[in-house]
Image (cartoon, rainbow, N blue to C red):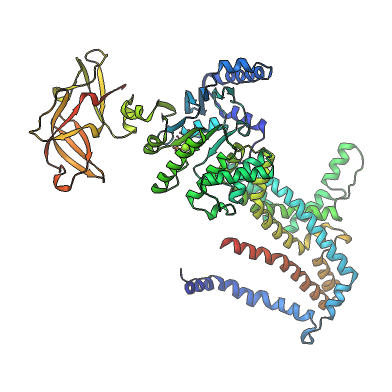
Amino acid sequence: MMPLPREERTQQVARDDSRPNGLGEDVVSAARSNRRDGSAGLVAKNRSENDPKYAIELKDISKYFGSLAALHPTKLAVNRGEFLTLLGPSGSGKSTLLNLIAGGSGPSTGSIFLDGRDITRMPPRERGIGMVFQNYALMPHMTVFENVAYPLRARHFDRSAIRAKVTEALDRVGLRGLEDRKPRQLSGGQQQRVGIARCIVYAPAIIMMDEPLGALDKNLREQMQGEIKRLHKDLGTTFIYVTHDQEEALNMSDRICLMSLGAIAQLGTPDDLYFRPRSRFVAEFIGESNIITGRVEGNGRMLVSGNETFLVPHEKRSTGSELTVMVRPERVRICGSAESVTTGENVLDGEVVGTAFVGGTTRVAIQCANGLHMTAKMMSDRLATRPAAGDQVRVCWSSIDTVTLDS
Amino acid sequence: MNMTSSIRATAIFMSPAALIAIFIVMPPLLYVVYTSVNGLAFSLDLYADVVASKLFRQTLITTFVISGISCFVSLVLGFVVALHLASQPARRRAILLGLVLLPLWTSILVKCFAFMVLLGREGVINSILSWAFDAHIQLPMILNRIGTLIGMINWQVPLVVLPILASLLAIDEAVYRAASIMGAKPARIFWTVTVRLSLPGVLAGLLSIFVMSLGSFMVPALLGGPKDLMLSNLVDYYSRQVLDWPRASTISVILFAISVSFAAPLALWRRSRRI
Ligand SMILES: Nc1ncnc2c1ncn2[C@@H]1O[C@H](COP(=O)(O)OP(=O)(O)OP(=O)(O)O)[C@@H](O)[C@H]1O
Ligand SMILES: [Mg+2]
């Protein structure tokens, strides 16, 4: 509730870090000695050790609440000027990671480097990070102007500088003219724009946003996505963005860090995550997928139930070992029985068990003869020409669209 | 809900209160007013007389001084208590709040006698001090201004804690996080967020205890000395010792008017906030 004085905060950190096997003590003292080195004039050494080409670098950072690991020891390096999105289901540790960077709570283990500086034990106000909150967290008693001026007043800027900077920030988010309104006199989208203006006004080195659009409706969300992307381009600041909306993540990010159960499931570009998911979790979380399990047969083939063999990308694993592959539904074609199939394609007979017409695309569920359940996605046709439940069809897909998964 | 039905609903809910006001509260009040203006003669002579009297003026000042000081001290103490309560986990807060409110459920008479036992010349505190310093200590803490203030503050603090606590709990925790991330030091956060956002509770609490203090009778009568007479005690003096009922009525009406002048803004302000 109350902002704690410095000592109490550190104590509290020490208290809720009931970490396993007493690892924490070493890290804490390591962090302390590190800082002492820095103040003793060894800054240069520090710099070369922790490559300052990263805007943020997390080294084996973790957070435990009692025995619950909200974040397992995690390494993460964020490039300068990058738009990185933390994506993941509820409870996967996204906010925990963000809070550790912001300094809202201390890590159980590990250290955090901002521009090569160790900030692990630095209080939030000294980190120079900006944050946008899901529920805006505006000061309800202050006008828009005062809200945006708040971080500048905390930094003792003079009046004219404050006026100029606030005006510029409000210009950027398109809120000029609303300076004297109170937050409750604004719409949700406008309130979030104030939140963004308040964050960019002091030009923080890193801007973090925790589900900033979560409380807005779909249309406004898409519009704001565009605005935030543009802002990122204009400012060139490093952005760390949290969402559990995969489309938002794919649309906005340079890289996506997909999290699951307090650990990073995969870190990569939106393309990587969509077209080269490493695990079944990634494949199923991002987009839709057909998962096929079987055994390696060698020669770019796999054996699945019903003694069927499929062509798959060449596989280093030994013959007979288990294999899981994935095909995106939009890569699965439905073809008539007469249509010829090119080499390198897998073909299965089956029956349509259901279709879902969702506007631009139609999803077709097919029960295949060998018991496999496949989903195909295609551009929508008129009802008369769309496949209907009960139709006997053939589905085919190419081996190059098949992705091998780790498990 | 449309206008007429809402008025009707209000009427139904208000009627018991209205009936009580009309038949139980108003008649004696009106009789007091009637007495103070010398019945149908409707003379304001007594008012002029009372206002000119030295005893009344002195008592009026005492009333404001005691109320003002005790309310200020209670506000500071209550704010600290409310801050602490607000930072506690919900369960612990409920228990602690119960302890804060405990004195409210005790008769003020009982509490005054308890304070006599504690603060008296041969009371508990003086005995302990005497024993500790091995001397005969008789700090005068009762039948004087100190005793009065202690007695007043004792019942005011719980009343002022409640609205302040409500205001503090209504502050979104993310606002604190946002402020500290934006670079504000704890002192700035305390003034710009904690204090500023608890102001409605502070104002509500302060006005209500101040209005209640103006009419205090028991505490100055039992714990105060002759110099700590408040307006209610003056009313008591005229009605029971001197048996000058018209004068007692006049002072009552003046006291009532003063209280209303402080309570009315509070009521109006609350209503404007609700809408
Ligand atoms: N203060 C806390 N005390 C105990 N457990 C906590 C605390 N904060 C978070 N957790 C737990 O840590 C885990 C990760 O939480 P976190 O808030 O980081 O999830 P998230 O990915 O942000 O989820 P969401 O999308 O719902 O916001 C959850 O299991 C949560 O219950
Ligand atoms: Mg979260």
Percent position of residue B127, x then y: 85, 43
Residue A365 in percent (x, y) is at: 20, 38
> Which residue is at 11% across, 35% downward?
A336
Classify residue B47 as left or right of residue A350. right
Nearer-the-camera pick, B252 or A312: A312
Res. A260 visible in picture: no
Relative height, residue A124 to residue B234 (above, below): above
Q: Is residue B222 left or right of residue A369?
A: right
Between A347 and B273, the one nearer to me in the picture: A347
The image position of residue B116, as x and y in percent, is 81, 53
Q: Quadrant of the N terminus of chain A?
A: top right
User: What residue sits 83% from the left and 68% below the top?
Assistant: B234
In this view, the residue in front, A334 or B270, is A334
State whether residue A105 appears in this view: yes
Q: Is residue B174 left or right of residue A88?
A: right
- Above or below residue B147? Residue A255 is above
Rendered position, B174 above or below B28 = above
Quarter of image, res B243: bottom right
